[in-house]
Image: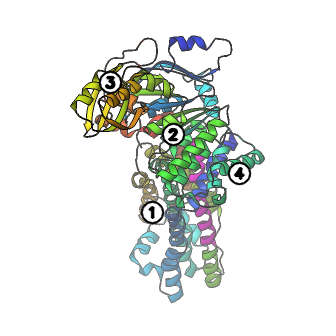
Amino acid sequence: MNWRTVLTVCGRDLRDAARNPGALVPAVVVPLVVTMALPLAIIYLPVLTRVPLTTFNWVAIFYAHIPPAVRAQLSALPAEAVEFYALAVYFFLPFFMLIPAAASTVAAADSFAGEKERRTLEALFYTPATDGELLFGKALAALVPGLAAAWAGLAAYTALIDVIGWSRYRLLPLPNVTWLLAGAVLLPAMAALAVALTVVVSARAKTSRGAQQVAGVVVVPAVALLVMQSLGVAYMGWGMVLLLSALAAAGAWLLLVLATRTFRRENAVLYS
Amino acid sequence: MAENAGGMDQAAAPGARAPVIEAQGLVRHYGNVVALAGLDLLVRRGEVVGLLGHNGAGKTTLVRVLGCLLAAGAGTAALFGLPIADPRARVEIRRRIGVLPQDPGLYDRLTAEENLASHGRLYGLADAHLARRVGELLELVGLSGERRRRVGTFSGGMKKRLAIARALVNDPGLVFLDEPTTGLDPAATHAMHEHIAALAARGGCTIVLCTHNLAEAERLCSRVVILERGREVASGPPAELERRFGGARRAEIDARALDAPAVEAVRGAAGISAVRVVGPNQLELDLGGDGALPAAVAALVAAGAEVTRAVEVRPTLEDVYLRLAGGDAAGVGDAAGGPDTAGGGDAAGGPDTPGGGGGARK
């Protein structure tokens, strides 16, 4: 593997994506909604207006299903801060899985299926870059925006929660071990899964939009986790973060192996 | 093939230029559709070879097979002596060729300079050398003033010129230009011809030019290969093909007082094989030899006609093309649909019928 070639492919795709508003919007809007708009609406406004969070039915359900071990941990907190802490630290984590999934899916679809659409692949395929270098470079380029957005979102959310927590309860809930682990392994693994799935889908999709639509299923685990957490079936502790990371990484690896083995320059040109 | 078996033998002859492309029996199918039907091709260093043929004749498929993008179903080919079937050799071949695809395929959101530089890095060119090379190439194609402009704002002609520059970024020994002037206006076409001619004149670079434009081939190519249904039907220098396959030598005569006895007098002149009256004062003649036209003029004058114009009309490459490959141009390839869209399919060809000693094969 020639890393200069990989980085050249990656750099060109990143530069191209940076000038593409269509690819930038999901990378900016989703993190903004997840890290700012939702916490402000769900946590800060009730806190500000002194409305108990459990007034909201879904929060009451979520709160009622908190496992005993977590509840014991929460009991050490001031009573008025428990609901805020539970929501801020546990409830919101699955939302962050959506960020790399959404942003990387768009970036990867634009990079692979989008190049087919724009007919830029043929000239690329006449260069001495190997299939592996092309795939890896493009996958890396698709990974970067999603991951950057997720990490930036994580930092912004941490700051927001700590500002609310400190100003109201003299608490700094984040970062904790679970969130640090999420940033270090879960979000990269989710971004890699989104990219790998999109690469596989893009090999068969003719347009980037078509690839996005199919590869969009990668957000399903995040949504499922939200629902499961609300029903008390699963909880976003560090064990769950590691388990999900391992599953996402394994899925990404399998899909990338599949993509590398099934990738044919010929097909990418003929069926575009 | 472009040069026949005898031509292959010349490869070993003292002083013969080294072969750059040696292909034998190349076959490529798209499903049931035959795109290449046992094609042979020999191209030597420094040649500018034109591939002529209608849509679906196999030109683009040939470029893609030789450019190591599509696999051949059968047959062998080597570029610079490196076999295209060998995966390791393919990387080296790609390092030494440049290709202008039918669609320029540039990155619209990048500038002209960024397009060339990022492409050049894929060939492992050092940054300092690459910066110099990019500058030279933009100068060559007349785009140095637009180097920092995004390609999406370029006209079709500018994009084609930039794509040619991109094909040259690695200083290739062999360049494939697939329909470089398709879709360009006359001025842009003329400019493109100038660029290709300049490239050919630099020497050391072998060019394979796919085109529908016969005047372009006549002007730029040292040799043309006419393809039909994935097979070669003729090859040679344009002038030689015109002489051999352009049909009878013809002449046009304008004359006053061109009555029936005058026409009969021309019919009886030495070396005149056919006479056609194409207007009240105009004749078209098929000439049988060098002295035929003066003899015809003399016969007309003797019969009382006043000759105002007499010119021999040389056959053109278009005459050759229409004679050899133009008969069923309509619909060839289009019938194939998918493969043609993919850039090089063909309607199903018949069995390969390799010809004999070069020139035309049919």
Instruction: Measure the C-alpha gap from mark 1 to mark 4.
Output: 55 Å
Residue picked out by circle 3: B349
Instruction: Measure the C-alpha gap from mark 4 to mark 3.
Output: 46 Å
Residue A226 numbered mark, or none: 1
Residue picked out by circle 2: A254
Residue flagged by tag 3: what amino acid is it?
A: Gly
A139 within the magenta span: yes
Q: Which residues are magenta?
A: A134-158
Mark 3 or 1: in front is: 3
| Residue A192 percent coordinates (x, y) | 55, 50
Residue placed most toward the observer, A16 or B77:
B77
Same-chain check, marks 2 and 3? no
Residue placed most toward the observer, A172 or A24:
A24
| Secondary structure, magenta segment, majority class | helix
Residue picked out by circle 4: B135
Instruction: Measure the C-alpha gap from mark 3 to mark 1.
Output: 60 Å
